[in-house]
Structures are given as structure tokens and as C-alpha cells.
Image: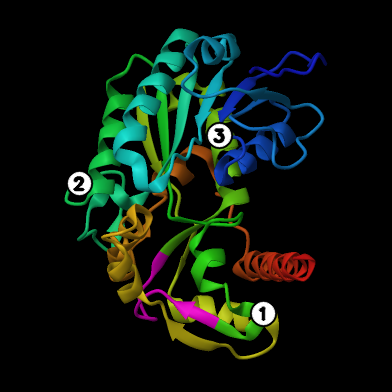
Amino acid sequence: MTTLPSQQHPPGRRVLVLGANGRLGSAAVQAFASAGWQVTAQARQAPRQPLPASVQALQADALDLPAMTRAAQGVDLIVHALNPDYARWDTLLPPLTDAVIRVAEASGATLMLPGNVYNFGRELPAVLTESTPFVANTPKAAQRIALEAAMAASRARSIVIRAGDFLGGTGTWIDLAIGKGLPDCRITQMGPQDLPHAWAWLPDLAQVFVQVAERVAERPDALPRHAVLHYAGLTLTGAELQAAFEAALHRPLQARAFPWWALRLAAPFSPMMRALSEMRYLWQRPHRLDETRLRALIGPVPHTPLAQVVQRLVTAAWDQNLSSKRKVAVV
């Protein structure tokens, strides 16, 4: 089913956001709409939260090529924020990749993708630049490498913005593990507390997408046909993240280690637990992204101060906890 409101938009740059109900997709819709772009927000289901008044909602499956091709006609940019079932990337990523590339090629739009650090493999180095070699020695690494290779080989212009783990929204390491015990003055450490880990605050990352898209629209020769840019975001050790939460809460937190052993025990019986367990290496290897090329392209890079980010995460954790308690009380 395709749902498009009847309101007319003033002429301007147009963007189709795929996966608008997801974490980055939702942030991208807000950021592009705030920047004055005409936004079409695609999702399989109805919007989970109210969309800005100027945004068109497209309710359709991303694999519905006729619907996607119609929606993409005349757009300048397609943001590929689709987030398939984490445990089924091997079967879901290839057809989604093919469909999105075909839509981008048919429309002539630039295709933008949020990249991650999986591509660098299990022994990823401490500093990640755009020239750091890919190593396909994990399933997720091989799958993401294939995705980016397909984009590079296509006729569509494409840009990958690589970033660390997401901060913000639901379904992240923060709300599922690290910050789940905050209301009870507990924090979960995913690995050694002194190892730097790359994070990306979603509103900032979405702003990066907007600024890169606008710079390329103004200067098409600013980037090659297929380009990769790194966004540094927030690089934090476990101890630094805990200190930031303690400062926001004005109280100490009791740290506990994440029970990776439980994921390993469940892995033979749960594809999701197996997929999550495979990512433990990211908490055993210090890493950060170098954003020198991004800064050269857009100038000052959006970076919300850590204290503000953590305060918003704390508020979200409290809201989620209260919501859960209300549900229990109702039952």
C-alpha cells in the first residue's frame, strides 16, 4: 500500500528516506525537513511518531520496485537507512541492496548510506581512516563489504558516511544493556573500561548527512562518484561514559560486566544471540574514526557536547523505565 498526502511542497531539493521508522531514518527525516528539503519518508508500517507537517509518508515495502521507483522519480537524494533483521543479514541484505541500487540508478539520485566499522574485521586498528583496508573475517564484515562494493560498482552516485555505534533512539547498546539499570544506579560495562569505543549521536549524524548532501549539490565535483567519509562522533572509554552518566545523575553508579557468557550459551538456539555475540570484539579493540576528510568537505562537523547527549539519554532511560512500570501495573 502506498500512502501519500495531498499537500503540495514548494520547489526545492528532494530526498527519499528509506527506513524512516528506524533510528537513523527517523533522525534523517527530521534533519532534512528542518533544512528545508522536500522529504518522502518510506516505511513498511505507518509512522511510529508524528512526522513534520511538510513530510510525505510513503507506506510500502522497500522491495516493491514499482512503488519505490515511482517515489524516487525527481528526487535528488536517497538515504538508505533500511535496517533489516540483524540475525538475517545474509538473506535480507543482498535483495535490499539490489533493490535500492536499482531505484537509485533509475532515478539518477545520489545514494547515501550510513556505514559502520564492521568492514575492518575482528582485528580492526585503533585509528580508522577511509584508506584502512577492509577485512572480511566476520560474517557482518563480509556482508557490509559486499554492500559497499555493490554501491561502488553501480551506475548511481553514492556516498557512505561511516560512524560508530548509535547513541539515541531505541534498540541500541545503551538502552538494551549499558544504561538499562540506570534507574537503579547501575551501569553495564561491555568490555575493559579503559578502551576507546566509537559512538555517533544520531541527531549529529543526521546533520552530517544533510551538510554533505548540500555541499555535493552545490559542488558536484567535490567528491568522486563513489565516496566514503568518516564521522568521528564521540570516542569514549567505558570509564568516561560512566563518569558522564554519574555527572548527569549526580550520583555514583555501580558497574557490572556484561554477561557475554550468557549470549554464548544462547547462541546455538538463538540467531539473534549468536549475531550479537559475534560483535564482542568491538568492545575488546580500541578504535576511533578519523574525520579529517569530512571536515575538509563541510567545515566544522556537528558535535553535541557529551554532557548534553548523556542528559538526553538519561531522560530517555527514565521515560522508558516509567513506561515499562505502567505497562506492568496495567497488566
Q: In what element is the residue under mark 3?
A: loop
**Residue at coordinates 59% horizontally, 56% vertically from top-left?**
170
| Kind of residue at badge 2 | Pro
Query: Is residue 285 something one can see in this rendering?
Result: no
Q: Magenta part of the protein: which range?
A: 187-197
How far is disc 2 from disc 3 in space, using C-alphas? 29 Å
Query: Is residue 297 something one can see in this rendering?
Result: yes
How far is disc 2 from disc 1 in space, using C-alphas? 41 Å
How would you rate the neighbour count of disc 2 (Cα within 10 Å): few for under 14, some for 14-19, many for 20 or more?
few
| Kind of residue at badge 3 | Gly
Which mark identifies residue 14? none
Viewer-nearest residue: 184 or 164 = 184
**Residue at coordinates 35% horizontally, 33% vertically from top-left?**
93
N-terminal of the two: label 2 or label 3? 3
In the figure, residue 7 lies in which quadrant? top right
Pointer 1: what residue?
Answer: 183
Pointer 3: what residue?
Answer: 19
Viewer-nearest residue: 13 or 192 = 192
Q: Is residue 259 found left or right of 48 in the rendered image?
A: left
Viewer-nearest residue: 144 or 219 = 144
Give coordinates of residue 90: x percent, y percent. 29, 38
In the figure, residue 99 lies in which quadrant? top left
Pointer 2: what residue?
Answer: 133
Of badges 2 and 1, the one in the foreground is: 1
How far is disc 3 from disc 1 in space, using C-alphas? 31 Å
Above or below: residue 112 compared with residue 166: above
Total numbered circles: 3
Q: In what element is the residue under mark 2?
A: loop
| Kind of residue at badge 1 | Pro
Q: Quadrant of the N terminus?
A: top right
